[in-house]
Image: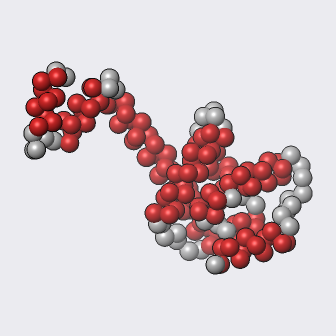
Amino acid sequence: MEVQKVKELLKNPNAKRADLKAALADAYHLDLHALKAAKEMESRIFNQCKGYFSQQYQNHTQVPLMWSAKDAGALKDIMKKLNQLTEGKTPVVEAFQYLIINLPDWYKSHGFSLPVINGKFNELIAEIKTNRNGASKSNVSDDYKARVLKDLVS
């Protein structure tokens, strides 16, 4: 886009958002279509994870999950962490499903929410890895369980 055209666009109070985005992308030599496609893909992955967790939650609790902004933020954080953990080698949806399937039973009974899973992410991954390597099924102490339950209730 020519500099003069960009200047006119910026001065125009009625400029369309799409035109401004196109000018900005052009100024930084970015492919606007590729950026849109990446955002749509991220949205699809988010919706797949959201749908999977909602179904698992309802199967486990017999109550539909009422989504909140806190849940959405936690899911986005979990997705980022899983992508970093797998170094992008495993699709995020698969990694998320694996996490939920292998979530320790205690968490399914007492802390089956995305904010809890996000907050205890490192501990959960470590426990899942330990259990996968043949350790006992429950290596969480009763004291630890009581503290987490107390944190959840308060």
Camera-nearest residue between 48 and 72? 72
Q: Nearer the viewer, residue 54 or 59?
A: 54
* Quadrant housing residue 3: top left
Report whether residue 94 is seen.
no
**Which quadrant of the view contains residue 6?**
top left
Q: Is residue 84 above or below residue 136?
A: above
**Residue closer to the observer: 150 or 98:** 150
Q: Quadrant of the N terminus?
A: top left
* Residue at the image position 61 percent from the left and 65 percent from the top: 113
List x then y, in percent, for residue 4.
Answer: 12, 24
- For the C terminus, the image quarter is bottom right
Image x and y of residue 10, in percent: 15, 36
Percent from the top left, x then y, of residue 71? 52, 62
**Does the image show residue 82?**
yes
Residue at 71% across / 66% down in the picture?
107
Which of the colour schemes (rainbow, by chain, secondary structure, one colour) is used?
A: secondary structure
Residue 101: x and y in percent read 69, 55
Residue found at x 59% / y 62%: 115
Residue at 66% from the left image edge and 38% from the top image edge: 86
